Image: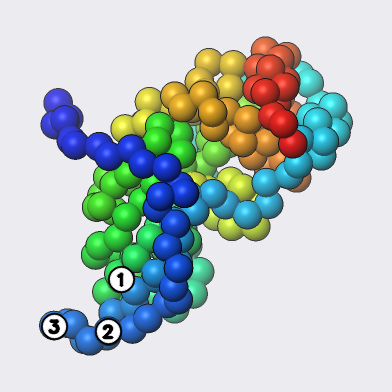
Amino acid sequence: MRLTRRRTTISLARRALTGAAAVVIGGAGLVAIDTSPALATPSGIPSKATAQSQLSALTVKSEGSMSGYSRNLFPHWITISGTCNTRETVLKRDGTSVVTDSSCAATSGRWYSPYDGATWTAASDVDIDHVVPLAEAWRSGASGWTTSRRQSFANDLTRPQLIAVTDNVNQSKGDQDPSTWQPPLSSYRCTYSKMWITVKYNWGLSLQSSEKSALQSMLNTCSS
């Protein structure tokens, strides 16, 4: 049973900080501190108009089989820079005042989860969500990809495919698409739909009819 933890919900506006990265000397040597604002939002999120165009262009078809699927066929997390892998890179990108040790592990910081509006101060409470889950990608066309292409998909920092969120919220999502799971914080569903759509569009993945209907409903809530 997971223990209940205290969650603090605060707005992005209140959390915005001004500053630049700094380096301080700690007991274990040099540690990096990222004092930029916590974004919890990856780059590459399209406008409503662009997302609508992309959604219209996606191929609608029945989901494929899970036969042969394994997360190991989507190698992650890979080294991005120095000692930092993809997970650690996203934790630094999405957090505030993130302190890392010499192996790039986050030892402290603050992370806002836009899925549920919670804020965490321990990296262990945060998962890096694949917006389009690996199993969903497999059912939508990735089963026919090379392992190299699946690795690129699983570690994609260019499109809005990776985001730091509350761990048990990510676990409740599992490999579901928007027809059966949407962020608990309804105000984020517009953004989530745009992220999902553009990831599927850029990676040439298909979607099923119920998924498209759910995405369209979510996209309709967007103002821009």
Query: Going by the image, does 1 lie left or right of 37?
Result: left
Q: Say whether disc 1 or disc 3 marks the residue closer to the N-terminus.
A: 3
**Which percent across, then down, holds residue 6?**
19, 36
Q: Residues within 10 Å of mark 3 (few under 14, many from 20)?
A: few
Residue corresponding to mark 3: 27
Q: Residues within 10 Å of mark 2 (few under 14, many from 20)?
A: few
Element type where label 2 sits in the image: strand
The disc placed on residue 24 is: 2
Q: Quadrant of residue 127?
A: top left
Element type where label 1 sits in the image: strand
Q: Quadrant of the C terminus?
A: top right
Residue 205 visible? The answer is: no
Q: Quadrant of the N terminus?
A: top left
**Residues under numbered marks 1 and 2 in contact, where contact means CB atoms less than 8 Å apart:** no
Residue 34 visible? The answer is: yes
Q: CA distance from mark 2 to mark 3?
A: 10 Å
Give the amino acid type for the residue marked by disc 1 in the picture: Thr
Give the amino acid type for the residue marked by disc 2 in the picture: Val
**Which percent across, then down, holds residue 114?**
46, 39
Q: Say whether disc 1 or disc 2 marks the residue closer to the N-terminus.
A: 2
**Residues under numbered marks 1 and 3 in contact, where contact means CB atoms less than 8 Å apart:** no
Q: Residues within 10 Å of mark 1 (few under 14, many from 20)?
A: many
Residue corresponding to mark 1: 100
Q: CA distance from mark 1 to mark 2?
A: 11 Å
Query: Between tags 1 and 2, which lies in front?
Result: 2
Which of these two is toward me, 200 or 181? 181
The residue sitting at 16% across, 30% down in the picture is: 4
